[in-house]
Image (tube, grey):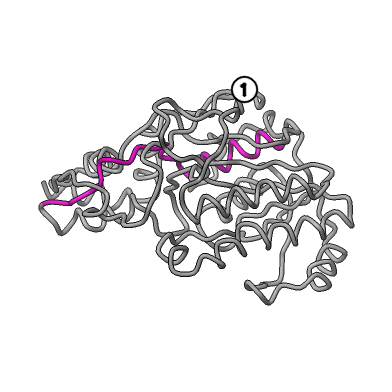
Amino acid sequence: MTTKNMRDHLDQSETTGLPARVMVLGGTRGMLGPALAQQLKTAGCEVLPIEPCQGESWNADGFCRQLERHEPDLVIYTLCTSSLEQVDQEPSRAFYWNKELPCFVARALNRFGLGLVTFSSDCVFDGRQQVPYTVNDEPHPTSVQGESFLAGERALQECGLRSLLIIRSSWLFGPFGPNFVDWVMQKGQHCRYLQVTHDEIGSPTYSMDLASYALRLMACKVTGVHHVCNSGQASWCELAAETLNACGLNCKVQAVTENAGHLQCQRPAFSVLDSRQSLALAKTKARPWPHALRDYIFTFHSQQVQGEELGR
């Protein structure tokens, strides 16, 4: 994304309350960490380096030494399990990444009087509701992924941190990592038909938008558990169709049930999140997911789109 594009996402006046020095755990991996790091730098924050620590190799003394060396004003945790297939096969790993490791980080931060921002998932809900979930709705996970995220939320809230912001989001797409939208674009170039699940409905969310909304919440010193995603809702089938249409691809979408489609693992049938209450605290509103989708495609896949349009 160009500097101008990123400034369109974050106005300086909306982020004047951001901490000067921020450590992003997971800032070089996945979709969200790099997006946050870029948005922080654009907002004028110093994103502190962190020596790579992988999984079980993390230790309290080593992490505390990094905190002493770099003296951050805030730490953001973006590490989590992203593979539902892996979670089903190794449930303990989900609890390690989504509960034990963030709590380990929180305990270290407590020693330095620092705050923490971390991320959770729409999977904490059971999907039986037919209206968007608000932060006041009681979570009731039905999967290992959801159980591990909820356990992490509750354990963190008991750590006694000076400030804690937990952001639930869902259905991420964007640069810096594989995602469903990229899968659709790749397959759509070579297939006449694409089978996609139609019986799961959620809130597609652009990672760059999630990062910018998160920064606005941080700038406003918001704490607690909050929902942040793009507005609107869609099935995976609708998201795929909108992606193909935006790219100008002639591939058609065939709606199938969950077990026959691209996504094989259990997710809530309905997990739409309502961000209005949370984003009002940051004096902003979420833009509709179709607008965000086109922004992502035309910003990061413009050559592919132009090539497809010229070939039609």
Position above or below: 221 against 192: above
Between residues 177 and 40, which one lies in front from this camera angle? Answer: 177
Name the residue located 59 percent from the left edge and 61 percent from the top edge.
95
Q: Residue at x 47, y 43 (%)?
A: 170
Give the residues in magenta.
Answer: 193-218
Q: Is residue 212 magenta?
A: yes
User: Which amino acid does the dot numbered 1 rest on?
Assistant: Ala
In terms of image quadrants, where is residue 84?
Answer: bottom left
- Please check the rendered image and state whether residue 63 is part of the magenta-colored stretch, yes or no: no
Residue 89 in the figure: left or right of residue 104: left
User: Of residues 173 and 37, which is closer to you in this image?
Assistant: 173
Among all residues in the image, which is located at the extreme bottom? 57
Q: Is residue 205 above or below residue 180?
A: above
Q: Residues within 10 Å of mark 1 (few under 14, many from 20)?
A: few
Residue 273 location, x and y as percent?
A: 48, 33
Residue 202 x, y percent position in the rendering: 39, 38
Image coordinates for residue 6, horizontal then vertical, percent: 54, 41
Residue 19, given in percent of the width and then of the height, sits at 78, 43
Q: Quadrant of residue 242?
A: top left
Local SS, label 1: helix
Looking at the image, which is closer to me, 136 or 272?
Answer: 136
300 sits to left or right of 153: left
Residue receiving disc 1: 280
